[in-house]
Amino acid sequence: MAEVKEFKLPDLGEGLTEAEVVRWLVEVGEAVAVDQPVVEVETAKAMVEVPCPYGGVVTARYGEEGEELAVGAPLLTVAVGAGTPAPGRGSGSPGPGSGDLAGVVAEAAGADVEAAEAGGAGETSGAVLVGYGTGAPPVRRRRVRPASHTPGGAVDGPAPAAAAGPVGGVPSGYGRHAVTPDAAVRQNGSAPAAGPVPVISPLVRRLARQNGVELRTLTGSGPDGLILRADVERAIGAAAAPAEQPAAASAADGEVRIALRGLRGVVADKMSRSRREIPEATCWVDADATELLAARRAMNAAGGPDAPKISLLAVLARICTAALARFPELNARVDTEAREIVRLERLHLGFAAQTDRGLVVPVVRDAHTRGAESLSEELARLTGSARAGTLTPGELTGSTFTLNNYGVFGVDGSTPIINHPEAAMLGVGRIVPKPWVHEGELAVRHVTQLSLTFDHRVCDGGVAGGFLRYVADCVEQPAVLLRGI
Protein backbone atom coordinates (compact mmCIF):
# COMPACT_ATOMS: atom_id res chain seq x y z
CA MET A 1 0.00 0.00 0.00
CA ALA A 2 1.39 3.38 -0.96
CA GLU A 3 2.38 5.77 1.83
CA VAL A 4 0.19 8.88 1.86
CA LYS A 5 1.88 12.13 2.81
CA GLU A 6 0.30 15.49 3.50
CA PHE A 7 1.74 18.63 1.91
CA LYS A 8 1.00 21.85 3.76
CA LEU A 9 1.01 25.45 2.48
CA PRO A 10 4.62 26.58 3.04
CA ASP A 11 5.81 29.94 4.32
CA LEU A 12 5.90 32.05 1.15
CA GLY A 13 7.81 35.05 2.40
CA GLU A 14 8.41 37.63 5.09
CA GLY A 15 5.30 38.58 7.04
CA LEU A 16 2.87 36.45 4.99
CA THR A 17 0.41 34.35 6.97
CA GLU A 18 -2.12 33.34 4.31
CA ALA A 19 -2.60 32.89 0.58
CA GLU A 20 -5.58 32.65 -1.75
CA VAL A 21 -6.02 29.62 -3.98
CA VAL A 22 -6.16 31.01 -7.52
CA ARG A 23 -6.00 27.88 -9.65
CA TRP A 24 -5.35 24.22 -9.07
CA LEU A 25 -2.79 22.81 -11.51
CA VAL A 26 -3.48 19.14 -10.71
CA GLU A 27 -6.57 17.01 -10.19
CA VAL A 28 -7.31 14.29 -7.66
CA GLY A 29 -6.07 11.01 -9.11
CA GLU A 30 -3.37 12.69 -11.19
CA ALA A 31 0.28 11.69 -10.93
CA VAL A 32 2.76 14.39 -9.92
CA ALA A 33 6.54 14.56 -9.88
CA VAL A 34 8.80 15.97 -7.17
CA ASP A 35 8.96 19.79 -7.39
CA GLN A 36 6.09 19.94 -9.88
CA PRO A 37 3.86 23.04 -9.40
CA VAL A 38 0.49 21.84 -8.09
CA VAL A 39 -1.38 25.05 -7.25
CA GLU A 40 -1.20 28.75 -8.08
CA VAL A 41 -1.81 30.98 -5.07
CA GLU A 42 -1.88 34.71 -4.57
CA THR A 43 -0.32 36.22 -1.48
CA ALA A 44 -0.50 39.82 -0.42
CA LYS A 45 2.63 40.39 -2.49
CA ALA A 46 2.65 38.17 -5.56
CA MET A 47 1.23 35.29 -7.59
CA VAL A 48 3.15 32.09 -6.80
CA GLU A 49 3.16 28.55 -8.19
CA VAL A 50 3.70 26.17 -5.28
CA PRO A 51 5.73 23.01 -6.06
CA CYS A 52 5.04 19.71 -4.31
CA PRO A 53 7.97 18.04 -2.52
CA TYR A 54 6.53 14.54 -3.10
CA GLY A 55 6.15 12.37 -6.18
CA GLY A 56 3.14 10.11 -6.54
CA VAL A 57 -0.62 10.33 -7.02
CA VAL A 58 -2.79 13.12 -5.62
CA THR A 59 -5.38 11.59 -3.28
CA ALA A 60 -7.00 14.77 -1.91
CA ARG A 61 -6.99 18.55 -2.33
CA TYR A 62 -7.91 21.20 0.22
CA GLY A 63 -9.39 24.60 -0.51
CA GLU A 64 -11.67 25.96 -3.22
CA GLU A 65 -10.37 28.32 -5.88
CA GLY A 66 -10.81 31.78 -4.39
CA GLU A 67 -10.51 30.53 -0.79
CA GLU A 68 -7.82 31.80 1.58
CA LEU A 69 -5.65 29.26 3.39
CA ALA A 70 -3.38 29.90 6.34
CA VAL A 71 0.32 29.08 6.16
CA GLY A 72 0.69 25.55 7.52
CA ALA A 73 -2.79 24.45 6.43
CA PRO A 74 -3.03 21.26 4.32
CA LEU A 75 -2.86 21.75 0.55
CA LEU A 76 -3.06 18.16 -0.69
CA THR A 77 -2.17 14.56 0.08
CA VAL A 78 -0.03 12.37 -2.16
CA ALA A 79 0.32 8.61 -2.37
CA VAL A 80 4.12 8.71 -2.53
CA GLY A 81 5.85 6.67 -5.21
CA ALA A 82 2.63 5.59 -6.90
CA GLY A 83 2.27 6.51 -10.55
CA THR A 84 5.16 9.00 -10.47
CA PRO A 85 5.68 10.22 -14.06
CA ALA A 86 8.95 9.37 -15.70
CA PRO A 87 11.04 12.29 -17.03
CA GLY A 88 9.60 13.59 -20.25
CA ARG A 89 6.11 12.20 -19.61
CA GLY A 90 3.02 14.19 -18.82
CA SER A 91 1.90 14.09 -15.20
CA GLY A 92 -1.56 12.95 -16.23
CA SER A 93 -0.33 10.08 -18.39
CA PRO A 94 0.79 6.87 -16.68
CA GLY A 95 4.23 5.72 -17.75
CA PRO A 96 5.79 2.30 -17.54
CA GLY A 97 5.47 0.93 -14.06
CA SER A 98 3.14 3.65 -12.95
CA GLY A 99 0.26 1.28 -12.43
CA ASP A 100 -3.44 2.02 -12.60
CA LEU A 101 -3.84 5.56 -11.24
CA ALA A 102 -7.43 4.98 -10.23
CA GLY A 103 -6.45 1.81 -8.40
CA VAL A 104 -3.61 3.53 -6.58
CA VAL A 105 -5.87 6.37 -5.45
CA ALA A 106 -8.56 3.98 -4.34
CA GLU A 107 -5.99 1.94 -2.41
CA ALA A 108 -4.79 5.09 -0.64
CA ALA A 109 -8.39 5.93 0.24
CA GLY A 110 -9.08 2.43 1.50
CA ALA A 111 -11.67 1.75 -1.21
CA ASP A 112 -12.00 -0.74 -4.06
CA VAL A 113 -12.55 0.57 -7.56
CA GLU A 114 -14.89 -1.15 -9.93
CA ALA A 115 -14.21 -1.07 -13.64
CA ALA A 116 -15.67 1.94 -15.41
CA GLU A 117 -17.09 2.08 -18.87
CA ALA A 118 -14.56 2.71 -21.60
CA GLY A 119 -14.29 6.36 -22.56
CA GLY A 120 -15.87 7.64 -19.32
CA ALA A 121 -17.02 11.26 -19.18
CA GLY A 122 -14.33 13.81 -18.52
CA GLU A 123 -13.30 17.35 -19.36
CA THR A 124 -9.80 18.20 -20.55
CA SER A 125 -8.61 21.70 -19.86
CA GLY A 126 -5.94 21.81 -22.53
CA ALA A 127 -2.18 21.32 -22.66
CA VAL A 128 0.15 23.39 -20.45
CA LEU A 129 3.88 23.49 -19.83
CA VAL A 130 5.02 22.39 -16.40
CA GLY A 131 8.59 22.41 -15.06
CA TYR A 132 9.74 19.29 -13.22
CA GLY A 133 11.99 21.04 -10.73
CA THR A 134 15.05 23.22 -11.19
CA GLY A 135 17.35 22.43 -14.05
CA ALA A 136 14.94 20.02 -15.77
CA PRO A 137 13.32 20.89 -19.09
CA PRO A 138 9.58 21.54 -19.06
CA VAL A 139 7.31 18.77 -20.25
CA ARG A 140 3.85 18.99 -21.76
CA ARG A 141 0.94 17.48 -19.88
CA ARG A 142 -2.84 17.55 -20.02
CA ARG A 143 -5.01 18.30 -17.05
CA VAL A 144 -8.17 16.21 -16.82
CA ARG A 145 -11.15 17.33 -14.79
CA PRO A 146 -13.97 14.87 -14.05
CA ALA A 147 -17.34 15.95 -15.40
CA SER A 148 -18.88 15.38 -11.95
CA HIS A 149 -16.68 18.08 -10.43
CA THR A 150 -17.49 21.73 -10.07
CA PRO A 151 -14.96 24.32 -11.34
CA GLY A 152 -13.49 24.44 -7.84
CA GLY A 153 -13.10 20.67 -7.82
CA ALA A 154 -15.82 19.75 -5.30
CA VAL A 155 -17.67 16.55 -6.08
CA ASP A 156 -21.37 16.96 -6.89
CA GLY A 157 -23.73 14.81 -4.88
CA PRO A 158 -23.03 12.57 -1.89
CA ALA A 159 -19.70 10.78 -1.75
CA PRO A 160 -19.70 6.97 -1.71
CA ALA A 161 -19.41 5.45 1.73
CA ALA A 162 -16.01 3.99 0.87
CA ALA A 163 -14.59 7.49 0.64
CA ALA A 164 -15.77 8.51 4.10
CA GLY A 165 -12.93 6.84 5.95
CA PRO A 166 -9.56 8.36 6.80
CA VAL A 167 -7.10 8.92 3.96
CA GLY A 168 -3.51 8.50 4.99
CA GLY A 169 -4.26 9.68 8.50
CA VAL A 170 -6.33 12.69 7.41
CA PRO A 171 -9.63 12.92 9.34
CA SER A 172 -12.78 11.99 7.44
CA GLY A 173 -14.39 14.94 5.71
CA TYR A 174 -11.35 17.18 6.20
CA GLY A 175 -10.39 17.36 2.55
CA ARG A 176 -12.54 19.46 0.26
CA HIS A 177 -11.47 17.46 -2.78
CA ALA A 178 -10.88 13.95 -1.45
CA VAL A 179 -11.03 11.32 -4.17
CA THR A 180 -13.98 8.98 -4.67
CA PRO A 181 -13.62 5.69 -6.54
CA ASP A 182 -15.90 6.62 -9.46
CA ALA A 183 -14.25 10.00 -9.81
CA ALA A 184 -10.80 8.39 -9.74
CA VAL A 185 -11.70 6.17 -12.67
CA ARG A 186 -13.22 9.03 -14.63
CA GLN A 187 -9.95 10.91 -14.20
CA ASN A 188 -8.56 8.71 -16.96
CA GLY A 189 -11.47 9.29 -19.34
CA SER A 190 -11.28 11.40 -22.45
CA ALA A 191 -13.34 14.17 -24.00
CA PRO A 192 -12.90 16.90 -26.55
CA ALA A 193 -10.48 19.56 -25.31
CA ALA A 194 -12.02 22.84 -24.18
CA GLY A 195 -10.42 25.93 -25.66
CA PRO A 196 -8.35 28.13 -23.32
CA VAL A 197 -9.72 31.45 -22.15
CA PRO A 198 -7.84 34.22 -24.04
CA VAL A 199 -6.58 36.11 -20.99
CA ILE A 200 -3.02 36.47 -19.74
CA SER A 201 -2.96 38.88 -16.80
CA PRO A 202 -3.53 37.30 -13.36
CA LEU A 203 -4.95 40.66 -12.26
CA VAL A 204 -7.66 40.39 -14.91
CA ARG A 205 -8.48 36.84 -13.78
CA ARG A 206 -8.70 37.92 -10.17
CA LEU A 207 -10.88 40.95 -11.00
CA ALA A 208 -13.28 38.68 -12.88
CA ARG A 209 -13.32 36.08 -10.11
CA GLN A 210 -13.98 38.64 -7.36
CA ASN A 211 -16.92 40.11 -9.28
CA GLY A 212 -18.44 36.89 -10.55
CA VAL A 213 -17.65 37.51 -14.22
CA GLU A 214 -17.38 34.37 -16.38
CA LEU A 215 -14.42 35.04 -18.67
CA ARG A 216 -15.60 32.54 -21.29
CA THR A 217 -18.66 34.70 -21.95
CA LEU A 218 -16.60 37.79 -22.83
CA THR A 219 -15.30 38.92 -26.19
CA GLY A 220 -11.82 40.37 -25.76
CA SER A 221 -10.94 43.73 -27.29
CA GLY A 222 -7.19 43.05 -27.28
CA PRO A 223 -5.01 41.50 -29.98
CA ASP A 224 -6.34 38.12 -31.17
CA GLY A 225 -9.34 38.48 -28.89
CA LEU A 226 -7.28 38.88 -25.70
CA ILE A 227 -9.49 39.77 -22.74
CA LEU A 228 -8.32 43.00 -21.14
CA ARG A 229 -9.07 44.61 -17.80
CA ALA A 230 -11.37 47.10 -19.56
CA ASP A 231 -13.46 44.19 -20.92
CA VAL A 232 -14.00 42.81 -17.43
CA GLU A 233 -14.78 46.27 -16.01
CA ARG A 234 -17.41 46.82 -18.71
CA ALA A 235 -19.02 43.50 -17.80
CA ILE A 236 -18.99 44.44 -14.12
CA GLY A 237 -20.56 47.81 -14.90
CA ALA A 238 -23.29 46.21 -17.01
CA ALA A 239 -24.14 43.75 -14.25
CA ALA A 240 -24.14 46.42 -11.56
CA ALA A 241 -26.29 48.96 -13.44
CA PRO A 242 -29.64 47.76 -12.05
CA ALA A 243 -28.24 47.76 -8.51
CA GLU A 244 -26.86 51.30 -8.53
CA GLN A 245 -29.79 52.81 -6.62
CA PRO A 246 -29.71 50.39 -3.65
CA ALA A 247 -25.92 50.82 -3.43
CA ALA A 248 -26.27 54.59 -3.20
CA ALA A 249 -28.90 54.22 -0.51
CA SER A 250 -26.73 51.96 1.59
CA ALA A 251 -23.90 54.50 1.44
CA ALA A 252 -26.16 57.29 2.69
CA ASP A 253 -24.87 56.82 6.22
CA GLY A 254 -21.62 58.45 5.08
CA GLU A 255 -19.39 55.59 6.14
CA VAL A 256 -17.33 53.24 4.01
CA ARG A 257 -15.32 50.43 5.60
CA ILE A 258 -12.33 48.87 3.85
CA ALA A 259 -10.78 45.76 5.35
CA LEU A 260 -7.09 45.95 6.17
CA ARG A 261 -6.22 42.64 4.57
CA GLY A 262 -4.08 41.34 1.76
CA LEU A 263 -1.41 43.72 0.51
CA ARG A 264 -2.98 46.70 2.27
CA GLY A 265 -2.90 44.81 5.56
CA VAL A 266 0.74 43.76 5.15
CA VAL A 267 1.77 47.34 4.36
CA ALA A 268 -0.18 48.65 7.36
CA ASP A 269 1.42 46.17 9.74
CA LYS A 270 4.94 46.81 8.44
CA MET A 271 4.64 50.59 8.53
CA SER A 272 3.17 50.50 12.04
CA ARG A 273 6.00 48.29 13.25
CA SER A 274 8.57 50.60 11.66
CA ARG A 275 7.17 53.63 13.44
CA ARG A 276 6.96 51.78 16.76
CA GLU A 277 10.49 50.37 16.73
CA ILE A 278 12.69 52.75 14.72
CA PRO A 279 13.69 56.20 16.04
CA GLU A 280 13.89 57.78 12.61
CA ALA A 281 15.11 61.21 11.54
CA THR A 282 15.07 62.90 8.13
CA CYS A 283 17.48 65.31 6.46
CA TRP A 284 17.13 66.78 2.98
CA VAL A 285 18.89 68.96 0.43
CA ASP A 286 18.11 70.54 -2.94
CA ALA A 287 20.37 69.50 -5.80
CA ASP A 288 20.91 70.74 -9.35
CA ALA A 289 20.25 67.69 -11.55
CA THR A 290 20.93 69.41 -14.88
CA GLU A 291 24.28 67.68 -15.40
CA LEU A 292 22.85 64.34 -14.31
CA LEU A 293 20.20 64.53 -17.05
CA ALA A 294 22.87 65.49 -19.58
CA ALA A 295 25.07 62.56 -18.49
CA ARG A 296 22.19 60.13 -18.93
CA ARG A 297 21.49 61.43 -22.42
CA ALA A 298 25.16 60.98 -23.29
CA MET A 299 25.22 57.43 -21.92
CA ASN A 300 22.19 56.45 -24.01
CA ALA A 301 23.58 58.14 -27.11
CA ALA A 302 26.85 56.26 -26.73
CA GLY A 303 24.99 52.96 -26.70
CA GLY A 304 23.57 53.46 -30.18
CA PRO A 305 19.95 53.42 -31.36
CA ASP A 306 19.46 49.69 -30.76
CA ALA A 307 21.00 49.51 -27.29
CA PRO A 308 18.69 49.36 -24.22
CA LYS A 309 18.17 52.78 -22.68
CA ILE A 310 19.46 53.44 -19.19
CA SER A 311 16.71 54.80 -16.96
CA LEU A 312 17.07 57.71 -14.60
CA LEU A 313 16.16 55.41 -11.72
CA ALA A 314 19.08 53.16 -12.67
CA VAL A 315 21.50 56.10 -12.56
CA LEU A 316 20.17 57.06 -9.12
CA ALA A 317 20.50 53.44 -8.01
CA ARG A 318 24.14 53.42 -9.14
CA ILE A 319 24.73 56.57 -7.12
CA CYS A 320 23.18 54.83 -4.09
CA THR A 321 25.53 51.86 -4.39
CA ALA A 322 28.54 54.19 -4.55
CA ALA A 323 27.31 56.20 -1.55
CA LEU A 324 26.70 53.09 0.55
CA ALA A 325 30.20 51.84 -0.25
CA ARG A 326 31.47 55.06 1.35
CA PHE A 327 28.98 54.99 4.24
CA PRO A 328 28.36 51.30 5.02
CA GLU A 329 26.78 52.23 8.35
CA LEU A 330 23.49 52.73 6.50
CA ASN A 331 23.45 49.27 4.90
CA ALA A 332 22.49 47.69 8.19
CA ARG A 333 19.75 46.60 10.54
CA VAL A 334 19.31 46.49 14.31
CA ASP A 335 18.96 43.20 16.20
CA THR A 336 16.78 44.41 19.06
CA GLU A 337 16.96 41.16 21.04
CA ALA A 338 20.77 41.04 20.99
CA ARG A 339 21.04 44.86 21.14
CA GLU A 340 23.46 44.80 18.22
CA ILE A 341 23.85 46.73 14.96
CA VAL A 342 24.28 44.28 12.09
CA ARG A 343 26.22 45.75 9.15
CA LEU A 344 25.69 43.90 5.89
CA GLU A 345 28.36 43.22 3.28
CA ARG A 346 25.90 42.65 0.42
CA LEU A 347 23.58 45.36 -0.84
CA HIS A 348 20.11 44.26 -1.91
CA LEU A 349 18.48 47.44 -3.18
CA GLY A 350 14.73 47.77 -2.81
CA PHE A 351 12.77 50.33 -4.80
CA ALA A 352 9.21 51.47 -4.28
CA ALA A 353 6.84 50.57 -7.11
CA GLN A 354 3.19 51.58 -7.28
CA THR A 355 0.92 48.95 -8.87
CA ASP A 356 -2.80 48.30 -9.25
CA ARG A 357 -2.55 46.10 -6.16
CA GLY A 358 -0.82 48.77 -4.10
CA LEU A 359 2.73 49.69 -3.12
CA VAL A 360 5.33 46.93 -3.40
CA VAL A 361 9.10 46.97 -2.97
CA PRO A 362 10.89 44.70 -5.48
CA VAL A 363 14.51 43.91 -4.67
CA VAL A 364 17.60 44.09 -6.91
CA ARG A 365 19.93 41.43 -5.53
CA ASP A 366 23.60 42.31 -5.11
CA ALA A 367 23.08 45.77 -6.53
CA HIS A 368 26.64 46.72 -5.51
CA THR A 369 28.00 44.37 -8.21
CA ARG A 370 26.00 45.91 -11.07
CA GLY A 371 26.71 48.80 -13.41
CA ALA A 372 24.14 51.30 -14.66
CA GLU A 373 23.13 49.18 -17.65
CA SER A 374 22.66 46.02 -15.59
CA LEU A 375 20.71 47.96 -12.96
CA SER A 376 18.47 49.43 -15.64
CA GLU A 377 17.66 46.01 -17.10
CA GLU A 378 16.89 44.49 -13.70
CA LEU A 379 14.79 47.45 -12.58
CA ALA A 380 12.76 47.23 -15.79
CA ARG A 381 12.25 43.48 -15.39
CA LEU A 382 11.12 43.76 -11.78
CA THR A 383 8.84 46.71 -12.54
CA GLY A 384 7.14 44.75 -15.30
CA SER A 385 6.66 41.76 -13.00
CA ALA A 386 5.30 44.03 -10.26
CA ARG A 387 2.66 45.49 -12.57
CA ALA A 388 1.69 42.02 -13.78
CA GLY A 389 1.50 40.72 -10.21
CA THR A 390 4.00 37.93 -10.89
CA LEU A 391 6.83 38.83 -8.53
CA THR A 392 8.05 35.90 -6.45
CA PRO A 393 8.43 36.15 -2.67
CA GLY A 394 12.21 36.09 -3.18
CA GLU A 395 11.94 39.19 -5.35
CA LEU A 396 9.95 41.04 -2.70
CA THR A 397 11.92 40.30 0.46
CA GLY A 398 15.42 40.74 1.82
CA SER A 399 16.17 44.34 0.82
CA THR A 400 18.83 46.13 2.88
CA PHE A 401 18.29 49.71 1.64
CA THR A 402 15.39 51.29 -0.28
CA LEU A 403 15.30 53.94 -3.02
CA ASN A 404 11.98 55.78 -3.25
CA ASN A 405 11.40 57.89 -6.36
CA TYR A 406 8.23 59.66 -5.22
CA GLY A 407 8.90 62.43 -7.73
CA VAL A 408 6.90 60.40 -10.27
CA PHE A 409 3.79 61.51 -8.34
CA GLY A 410 4.63 65.16 -8.99
CA VAL A 411 5.73 66.00 -5.44
CA ASP A 412 8.92 67.73 -4.30
CA GLY A 413 9.61 66.08 -0.97
CA SER A 414 8.57 63.52 1.60
CA THR A 415 9.56 62.05 4.95
CA PRO A 416 9.10 58.35 4.11
CA ILE A 417 8.70 55.60 6.68
CA ILE A 418 11.69 53.26 6.73
CA ASN A 419 11.10 49.83 5.23
CA HIS A 420 11.55 47.73 8.39
CA PRO A 421 14.07 46.28 9.30
CA GLU A 422 16.31 48.45 7.12
CA ALA A 423 18.23 51.42 8.50
CA ALA A 424 17.58 54.08 5.85
CA MET A 425 15.65 55.14 2.76
CA LEU A 426 16.64 57.67 0.10
CA GLY A 427 13.81 59.70 -1.41
CA VAL A 428 13.98 61.62 -4.70
CA GLY A 429 11.48 64.35 -5.56
CA ARG A 430 10.43 65.56 -8.98
CA ILE A 431 13.01 67.27 -11.20
CA VAL A 432 11.66 70.63 -12.32
CA PRO A 433 13.13 73.84 -13.85
CA LYS A 434 13.80 76.45 -11.14
CA PRO A 435 15.79 79.65 -10.73
CA TRP A 436 19.24 78.63 -9.48
CA VAL A 437 22.56 80.33 -8.94
CA HIS A 438 24.96 78.59 -11.31
CA GLU A 439 28.61 79.69 -11.59
CA GLY A 440 27.79 82.98 -9.89
CA GLU A 441 24.83 83.85 -12.10
CA LEU A 442 21.10 83.32 -11.87
CA ALA A 443 19.98 80.64 -14.33
CA VAL A 444 17.13 78.21 -14.92
CA ARG A 445 18.31 74.76 -13.85
CA HIS A 446 16.64 71.38 -13.31
CA VAL A 447 16.43 70.96 -9.53
CA THR A 448 15.36 68.08 -7.33
CA GLN A 449 15.00 67.58 -3.59
CA LEU A 450 16.75 64.62 -1.99
CA SER A 451 15.75 63.31 1.44
CA LEU A 452 17.26 60.65 3.66
CA THR A 453 15.28 59.05 6.45
CA PHE A 454 17.56 57.04 8.72
CA ASP A 455 17.53 55.00 11.91
CA HIS A 456 19.25 57.15 14.51
CA ARG A 457 20.38 54.03 16.35
CA VAL A 458 22.77 52.97 13.58
CA CYS A 459 24.45 56.34 13.07
CA ASP A 460 24.46 60.00 14.01
CA GLY A 461 23.72 63.02 11.86
CA GLY A 462 27.30 63.25 10.60
CA VAL A 463 27.10 59.93 8.75
CA ALA A 464 23.59 60.64 7.44
CA GLY A 465 24.56 64.12 6.30
CA GLY A 466 27.76 62.82 4.68
CA PHE A 467 25.83 60.17 2.75
CA LEU A 468 23.22 62.64 1.52
CA ARG A 469 25.83 65.24 0.56
CA TYR A 470 27.76 62.66 -1.46
CA VAL A 471 24.56 61.66 -3.30
CA ALA A 472 23.83 65.33 -4.02
CA ASP A 473 27.38 65.88 -5.29
CA CYS A 474 26.99 62.93 -7.69
CA VAL A 475 23.67 64.32 -8.91
CA GLU A 476 25.16 67.76 -9.51
CA GLN A 477 28.51 66.49 -10.87
CA PRO A 478 28.24 62.91 -12.15
CA ALA A 479 31.99 62.87 -12.72
CA VAL A 480 32.34 62.47 -8.93
CA LEU A 481 31.43 58.82 -9.47
CA LEU A 482 34.58 58.34 -11.54
CA ARG A 483 36.72 58.74 -8.43
CA GLY A 484 35.42 55.42 -7.17
CA ILE A 485 35.98 53.48 -10.39
Image (tube, grey):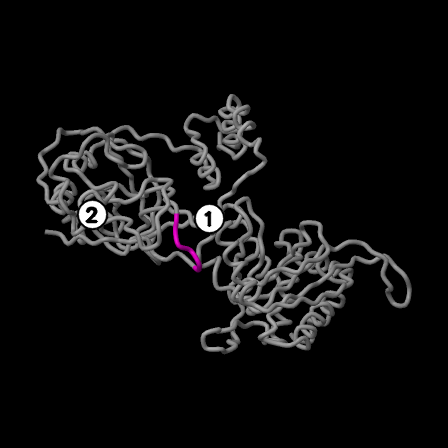
Residue 181: image tag: none
Question: In the rendered structure, which segment of residues is drawn in magenta?
Answer: 14-19
Badge 1 amino acid: Gly
Q: Main secondary structure of the magenta part?
A: loop
Neighbour tally class for label 1: few under 14, some 14-19, many 20 plus, Cα within 10 Å: some
Residue 16 in the magenta stretch? The answer is yes
Residue 174 in the magenta stretch? The answer is no
Please state the horizontal and vertical placement of residue 20, each as a whole percent of the image.
Answer: 39, 45
Please state the horizontal and vertical placement of residue 104, each as a whole percent of the image.
Answer: 14, 45
Label 1, on which residue?
262
Which of these two is toward me, 103 or 287?
287
Q: Residue at x 27, y 56 (%)?
A: 53
Q: Residue at x 14, y 45 (%)?
A: 109
Residue at disc 2, secondary structure: strand
Which of these two is toward me, 473 or 10?
10
Q: Quadrant of residue 90?
A: top left
The answer to whether residue 466 is above or below residue 50 is below
Badge 2 amino acid: Val
Label 2, on which residue?
57
Q: Quadrant of residue 71?
A: bottom left
